[in-house]
């Protein structure tokens, strides 16, 4: 479980294909190394992955076939920058919202509008996810906890404040880029209960 408050931007240093079809991804980082050990969970662009190796200023995580198929993790290349967050402790403040690291689907950046004090990002997402998007509700994009500024027919807009822009990979996103989308888990639980 995560909060969607990114701790640092890591840099992919190596990607190795494994015989199982999975990939081992080595990421250079600093802040998230504190108290991290093999077997711990790490959010990489919003995907909950397990640390399988830790050396100096690098961690390695493995992404299996299902993860590669459902997320944008398969698009990563050497030099790619990724949002990183350690899993939340029960004693931590919940600064964002409950982010599971279980990506629902990928979406895409439609446009980025620079405003006087912020930037407005427009995202397109698969139609089945639209029922979970609500005005001023929570959504996770590449692991970042965000508030929906506007619900659209095929996606949503979010306002990115300067702090978020400077401390996440939002600064590197361009129209057409693929992103990981995780809908607020509460909405999915409510739907499941009502269906029963």
Image: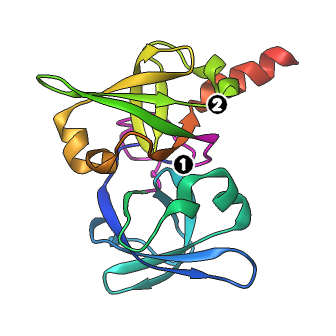
Q: Are marks 2 and 1 in contact (CB under 8 Å)?
A: no
Question: At 31% across and 44% down in the image, what residue appears?
Answer: 170
> Taking 61 as reference, is 81 above or below it?
above
Viewer-proximal residue among 41 and 166: 166
Quadrant position of residue 10? bottom left
Question: Is residue 20 part of the magenta span, yes or no?
Answer: no
Viewer-proximal residue among 143 and 89: 143
Start-end of magenta stretch: 86-106
62 on left or right of 115: right
Image location of residue 66, percent across then percent down? 73, 59
- Residue situated furthest left in the rendering: 116
Quadrant position of residue 175? top left
Helix, strand or loop at mark 2: loop
Quadrant position of residue 159? top left
Q: Main secondary structure of the magenta part?
A: loop
The numbered disc on residue 1 is 1
> Taking 79 as reference, is 178 above or below it?
above
> Taking 135 as reference, is 148 above or below it?
below
Image location of residue 192, percent across then percent down? 78, 24
**For the residues marked 2 and 1, what is the alpha-carbon distance in whole angstroms?**
24 Å
Residue under label 2, please give it: 126
Question: At 25% across and 40% down in the image, what residue appears?
Answer: 164
Q: Earlier in the sequence, mark 2 or mark 1?
A: 1
164 on left or right of 82: left
Helix, strand or loop at mark 1: loop
């Amino acid at each position: 479980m995560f909060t969607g408050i990114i701790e640092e931007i890591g840099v992919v240093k190596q990607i190795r294909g494994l015989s199982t079809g999975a990939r081992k991804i080595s990421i250079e980082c600093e802040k998230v190394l504190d108290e991290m050990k093999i077997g711990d969970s790490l959010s990489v662009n919003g995907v909950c992955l397990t640390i399988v190796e830790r050396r100096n200023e690098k961690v390695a995580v493995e992404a299996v076939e299902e993860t590669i198929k459902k997320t944008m993790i398969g698009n990563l290349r050497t030099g790619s920058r990724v949002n990183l967050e350690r899993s939340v402790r029960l004693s931590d403040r919940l600064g964002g919202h409950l982010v599971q690291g279980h990506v629902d689907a990928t979406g895409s950046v439609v446009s980025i509008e620079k405003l006087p004090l912020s930037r407005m990002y427009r995202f397109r997402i698969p139609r089945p996810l639209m029922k979970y998007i609500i005005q001023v509700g929570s959504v996770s994009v590449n692991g970042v906890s965000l508030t929906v500024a506007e619900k659209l027919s095929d996606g949503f807009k979010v306002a990115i404040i300067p702090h978020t822009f400077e401390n996440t990979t939002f600064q590197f996103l361009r129209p057409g880029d693929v992103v990981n989308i995780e809908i607020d888990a509460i909405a999915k639980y409510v739907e499941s209960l009502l269906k029963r």
